[in-house]
Amino acid sequence: MTLAENLFENLRLELRRGCLTLAVLVELRQEHYGYTLRKDLAESGLAIDESTLYPLLRRLESQGLLVSEWREEEKRNKRFYRLSSDGEQMLGQLLEEWNSINASISAIINRGQ
Amino acid sequence: MELLDRYLQAVKKHLPSRRQDDIIAELRANMESQLEDKEAELGRPLTATEAGDWLKQMGAPMMVAARYQPQQYLIGPAIFPIYLYVLRRVIVLAVIVYSAVVAVVIPLTAPSGAALLASALRIPGILITTAVWVTAVFAAVEFFATHYPGKCPPIDGLFGAWSPSTLPPVEKTTPTGRKPRSFAQAVAEIVFGLFFLGWLLLIPRHLFLIMGPGAFYWDASPFQFANVWTTIFWWAVVLSLVQLVWRCVDLVRGTWQQSARAQRMTIQAISLVPLGLLLSLPGRLYVTLKHPALDQLQYGSTLDTINKNIHLGVLFICAIVVLQLAFDIGKIALDAYRKGAAVQ
């Protein structure tokens, strides 16, 4: 990997980090377990590594933004996650922030063109 | 699948024991679902190679397990800049204190070049020990700030007393375009100043340090230094101390980049006192005979020549110092005149 490619990769990861958390919170308005959540995100164009997503779910749960429960589905025990009431409130604030940033960035890009 | 079991077992070994069963159960459920999807897509079980590639894509067991751990730092990014600042200052302080102790203790206890060299060689060890202690203290601060966030004052609080009015004035750029003194240069000047002081304090007992092999001939000669040199010696010690203290104060105040002109002029002005003492010495007797009654006849004229030459030497040094001082004063006056003209 060249220096420029490495720099791009670092900046891309930095840019995606916050977005992924937001996407996960949005997706978990509906209940999911880890694998289906990952599949849904990938289908929406936001592929995420297992080793990133599964620990992220646990962290968000420990922060009180998600709740989880073990349940049997298709003869297999799975841990299902969904947004907690605190998580819903937080998601509302984050979406507001996201829309504001998005609008600002769009305005800046349009002004520059 | 045996390979998956082995993989999960390897991941489990790196997880905290309290949560490992829960994490592994969840990871297994997710991975088995993924495996099922892959096999359904292919219409057959994965081959050993395909399974190996899939697990490789998941990541090394230790790395996968590490993602489940909270992010840990020995010294986190919030306090790292403070750590670096303190480390630099403490290391400098340690070197200065050590050098000062060496400069005073060695001449009083075991005055020798070997002792001085041994002391200098101990400096790297002292630097490492100091760095380890500073790092340990900051690692402890990081630990308590992370584990007891409510009980530990916030790092930002350390700068609560900060005010823009306490900022140092803008540093003057040198009109000659020369680079200002660097921090390393300022520290090196102090350390070498301390070693110079140590060397100076050794001279009365070890004359060879200043005269080289000539010291042995001097001892065997019928001549001896007059008492005035003892006074001059202590003046040199005082001058060296004044310069050292000044440099240390500059370093502590963070003003080492400023021009050293005032410092140089003060030292030059003070050095005129011992030079004046030498020039006004009655009879210009810088060197005397050890046994005047015995040697006056044989060495009297040599003694006169030595004293005349020393007097000329002192006169020459004095002229250089006066000229340097006059040059610096002239430059200050010129700068002030130019500044005044620029304002008008």
Image (spheres, coloured by chain):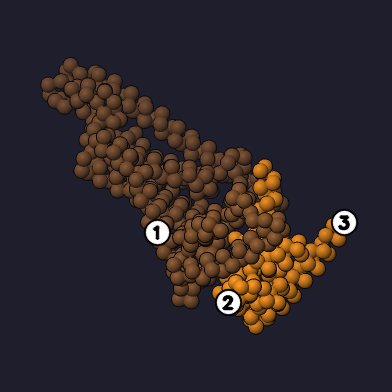
Chain colours: A orange, B brown
For disc 2, the marked residue is A70
Q: Quadrant of residue A13?
A: bottom right
Q: Residue at x 65, y 62 (%)?
A: B36
For disc 3, the marked residue is A113
Please provide percent x and percent y for residue B128: 38, 48
Q: Which mark is residue A32?
A: none
What is the chain letter for disc 3? A
The kind of residue tagged 3 is Gln
Nearest to N terminus: mark 2 or mark 3: 2
Is B159 above or below relative to B332? below
Question: What whole-number distance in Å separates the C-alpha atoms at marks 2 and 1?
Answer: 43 Å
Say yes or no: labels 2 and 3 on the same chain: yes
Q: Is residue B269 left or right of residue B126?
A: right
Query: Can the viewer see residue A43 in this picture?
Result: yes
Q: Which circle, 2 or 1, is nearer the viewer?
A: 2
Say yes or no: labels 3 and 1 on the same chain: no
Q: Residue at x 43, y 42 (%)?
A: B188
- Relative to the observer, which residue lies in front, B46 or B194? B46
Instruction: Give SS at disc 1.
Output: helix
Is A72 above or below relative to A105? below
The residue lying furthest to the left in this view is B294
The kind of residue tagged 1 is Ala
For disc 1, the marked residue is B136
Q: Residue at x 15, y 25 (%)?
A: B292
What is the chain letter for disc 1? B
Instruction: Give SS at disc 3.
Output: loop
Please provide percent x and percent y for residue B306: 28, 23
Instruction: Give SS at disc 2.
Output: strand
The kind of residue tagged 2 is Trp
